[in-house]
Image (cartoon, rainbow, N blue to C red):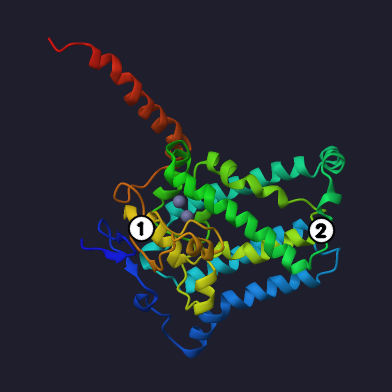
């Protein structure tokens, strides 16, 4: 395969990719359909920001956020059914069971974390040891700016953590499991080895009921990360795809082509990748590792450990075999 030159790199020499927005298919069909799939993302982005900005205190809680999150996820699943990006990514029973397992696991972990963070003891500890006064300068900023800064700092951390995962073997082991998925859909963000959840989720702390509104707003601003794995064909407006991570970007990150995976690391804000020269605009349909080998749930659970052990054995086990002279 020839591949396409992007900067100094050749992308798509191992597996087909599409590079450049002008080469990506558009939404086809009635005027109404095209309208909906062009403005859906911006509409809900502004709507959620407005909601968290104006909602009364009684409504602006983490549980409201969780409920909206679940409802919105169901709506996105309906969109995947109406207007899939790739037929080959459409849900099968096997994939659905896997997704259900991980989404369930995610909410269970969130529940447990929530029960600890929400406990009165911990709130007391936080209030005595965490000096909110020193953040006065921050809480004095306009609310939307606070929210944007929180979302940005969080995603900036995610970017470097994710990039680190692709460049340092001990971090790659737990993350690699997520890269074995062979299709994208809105629930696939949850699929991966749970160890990764702890690495990625270092900032989960936002889910308790007295959370400052700025955090809820930050969730709405950075929530565009939910579109990373969605199997829906959108005509994203130009400014949208310049600023935010899209399925197009993230599908390249999941490509079977190695060079393509070394791009688009951010979760929500693709402009962070643009800042550091790791952004590639394009998409891929053929995804996964080892030519698209599908992993079972038990293997997803154990892979980082078994694979790490194998590598250790190869590295240190060989010494003794080499020391034995042949004959
Ligand atoms: Zn990755
Ligand atoms: Zn992913």
Name the residue tied to disc 2: 137
In the image, residue 193 above or below residue 186: above
- Contact flag, marks 1 and 2 (Cβ < 8 Å): no
Bin the neighbour count of mark 2 within 10 Å (Cα to Cα): few under 14, some 14-19, many 20 and up: few
Describe the element under mark 1 as helix, strand or loop: helix
**Where, by quadrant of the figure, is residue 47 drawn?**
bottom right
Judge whether residue 255 can be spotted in this image.
Answer: no
Quarter of the image with the C terminus in it? top left
The extreme bottom residue here reads 31
Name which residue lies at 29% across and 65% down.
5
**Mark 1 lies on residue:** 260
Check the image and report above or below for 131 versus 230. Answer: above
Near mark 1 (Cα within 10 A), the count class, few <14, some 14-19 or many ≥20, is many
In this view of the protein, can residue 155 be seen by the observer? yes
Q: Which of the 4 image quadrants contains residue 90?
A: bottom left
- Could you say which quadrant of the image residue 202 lies in? top right
Q: Position of residue 72 (x, y in %)?
A: 63, 66
Which of 282 and 110 lies nearest the eye of the viewer?
A: 282
Q: What residue do we see at 26% from left, 56% from top?
A: 14
Q: Quadrant of the N terminus?
A: bottom left
- Above or below, comparing residue 80 to residue 312 in the picture: below
Sooner in the amino-acid sequence: mark 1 or mark 2: 2
Secondary structure of the residue carrying numbered label 2: helix
């Amino acid at each position: 395969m020839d591949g396409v030159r992007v900067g100094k790199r050749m992308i798509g020499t191992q597996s087909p990719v599409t590079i450049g927005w002008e080469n990506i298919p558009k939404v086809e069909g009635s005027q109404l359909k095209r309208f909906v799939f062009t403005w859906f993302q911006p509409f809900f982005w502004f709507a959620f920001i407005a909601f968290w900005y104006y909602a009364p205190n009684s409504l602006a809680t983490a549980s409201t956020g969780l409920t909206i999150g679940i409802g919105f996820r169901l709506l996105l699943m309906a969109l995947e059914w109406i207007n899939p990006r790739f037929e080959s990514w459409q849900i099968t029973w096997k994939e659905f069971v896997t997704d259900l397992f991980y989404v369930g696991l995610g909410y269970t972990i969130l529940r447990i974390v929530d029960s600890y963070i929400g406990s009165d003891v911990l709130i007391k500890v936080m209030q005595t040891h965490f000096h909110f006064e020193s953040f006065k300068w921050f809480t004095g900023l306009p609310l939307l700016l606070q929210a944007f800064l929180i979302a940005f700092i969080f995603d900036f951390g995610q970017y470097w953590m994710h990039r680190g995962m692709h460049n340092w073997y001990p971090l790659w082991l737990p993350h690699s499991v997520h890269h074995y998925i062979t299709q994208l859909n809105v629930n696939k963000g949850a699929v991966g080895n749970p160890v990764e959840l702890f690495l990625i989720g270092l900032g989960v702390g936002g889910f308790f009921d007295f959370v400052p509104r700025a955090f809820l707003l930050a969730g709405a601003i950075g929530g565009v990360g939910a579109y990373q794995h969605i199997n829906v064909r959108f005509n994203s407006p130009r400014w949208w795809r310049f600023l935010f991570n899209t399925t197009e970007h993230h599908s390249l990150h999941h490509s079977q082509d190695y060079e393509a995976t070394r791009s688009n690391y951010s979760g929500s804000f693709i402009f962070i990748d643009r800042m550091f020269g790791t952004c590639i605009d394009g998409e891929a349909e053929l995804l996964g590792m080892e030519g698209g080998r599908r992993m079972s749930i038990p293997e997803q659970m154990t892979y980082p450990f078994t694979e790490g052990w194998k590598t250790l054995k190869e590295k240190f086990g060989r010494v003794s075999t080499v020391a034995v002279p042949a004959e």
